[in-house]
Amino acid sequence: MRLLNKVIMVCALLAFAVPNAFAVQKLTADIVVVGGGFSGLSAALTAVREGASVVVFEKLPGLGGAGNYPEGSTGVGTKMQARAGYDTSVDKVFSAAIDFHHWRANAAVIRTLLENSGETIDRIEDMGVEFKGIKTTFPEEKSLHVWHCYKHNGASVVRAMQKEIYAKGGKIFLETPVTKLMTDKSGRVIGVYATDTAYGEKYEVKAKGGVILATGGFESNKKMLAQYVTDSSGEGMYEPIFYRGPVLDGREGDGINMAKAVGAGLAGMQTVAGNSPYLDDKHLPLIFQFNGSDSLKQTRAALSQPFLWVNQTGDRFYNESQGSSFTNVYNAMTSNGGVMYSIFDESMKQRMISSGPLIPFNAIVVVGQKMTELDQGIQTGIEQGYAFKANTLEELAKKIGVDVSHLKKSVASVNKYAADKKDPEWGRKPEHIIAFQDQGPYYALKGIRAFFLTLGGVKINTEFQALTTHGKPIKGLYVTGQDMGGLYDSSYDLLVEGSASGFALTSGRLAAQNIIKNELGR
């Protein structure tokens, strides 16, 4: 409807030769939100619920961005946890989180986010969003039980927020990136400049209360990755899961760069949310392995199975039982050139087909789920160049380009460890040590390291105000989601499962509340 209305308007203007057809439109709102993902929509929803006028600018044709994909989000002290009988507390989760980061993180902001995360999840549940329940990738005794998994992923949350924002009068402009922050003589941020990329309309929007940055980090800005992420050197070594193919990804550091232009300091820019390996499929965005065909998802699950992982020299380099611990996998792969090969034989393949994976692929392919489409997935991989099949180990080594003697030695080691029921090298679980058959066929899947998100961004305080390099608040400027910096040390905290999406939702809500309270005085 928005597109149709614009087409009619443009045609009419051109037909009658109206002068200044694209004159700057000047608007005013209580709050301006830059970005329509999880944190931006959470901020906008909070604003309209509390009676504030809000304008949201989103650079892409649709809302949600990467927020459409999360399986679940962090929450502490939720009604769902109470119903399930979990005694998870803020103290317990905060202690685990800050210990993981060795206190090299903004402890006060982390605590604020955790203290308010339960209310965020409760509000989402109250909106009618369906949940699978509280899930975990850890053994029950180690889990914090904070990962509230959506029945239909983050897209269901996006739809629910969008619907209510529109219903309560919020304005959302699609394909309209903000190009610059508006400031007054004192340096206070008082609004934004934006341009509709489809039709050239320009907007100047004054924000009575403040501007909220929610542009999602810089995952798709190769220049910024090279500048800030210190281990991003090497062609083909560093792949965000959204890069390849036709999927649009607007996370190019817009909010971070705009904040920097008005004096904001940055924190934690080197940190990313590393992931387990993904199939080296050059024809599709890696995210399709998360939500594509069953054959593709099952082949990705096969990649992470604990049979045998080797690096580019044909040597084992990791405890394959920990294939679901994606931050550890990412770090190990980084230390081994960013590439791995998962090796298995025909009997191992048939076991996956008939009985399912030994370890899950997130919550996408779970233990016990028969992988009946695996043969088709492997055949597609052979055609695309990331799967390999050979009758001998010598032939397989040649196809994947590793040293034959090293690969044979790795296989022999696994066979010995299977007989001994103990892995003295890397400590793989005994139930995961399975001997290889003496005869082929043998298979290899090529995996590359990949990451979900950048985790560095603008320095902030517990009010979610942007700070200068010296820690002074920049009046009128608030930062949320993956534009926030300093919440992680060197790695994503997998133990606090769903923290990136949970912190995005909670930071958006709190930023809007702080503007309404502190700036608008309501």
Image (cartoon, rainbow, N blue to C red):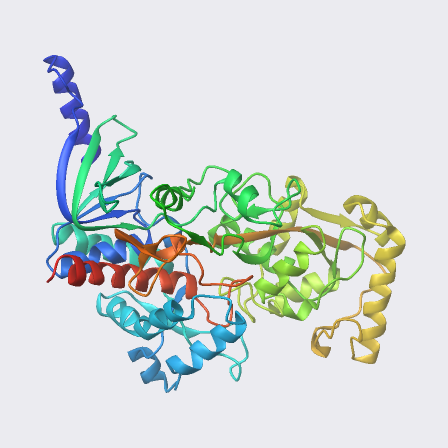
Location of the N terminus (image quadrant): top left
Above or below — where is 303 with respect to 422?
above
Instruction: Residue at 13% x, 51% y: name it.
Output: 53
Left or right of 75? Residue 232 is right
Taking the spot 40% from the left edge, 82% from the top edge, the residue there is: 91
Quadrant in which the C terminus appears: bottom left
Q: Is residue 45 left or right of residue 374?
A: left
Q: Is residue 152 visible?
A: no
The spot of residue 7 in percent (x, y) is 19, 25
Name the foreground residue: 203 vs 340. Answer: 203
Q: Which residue occupies the foreground of this view, 298 or 196?
A: 196
* Residue 11, percent from left and from top: 16, 19
Residue 34: percent from the left, percent from the top?
28, 46
The residue under the point 77% across, 62% down is 316
Depth order, front residue of 141/368: 141
In the image, residue 324 sits, relative to residue 66, either above or below, namely below
User: Residue lying farthest right?
Assistant: 405
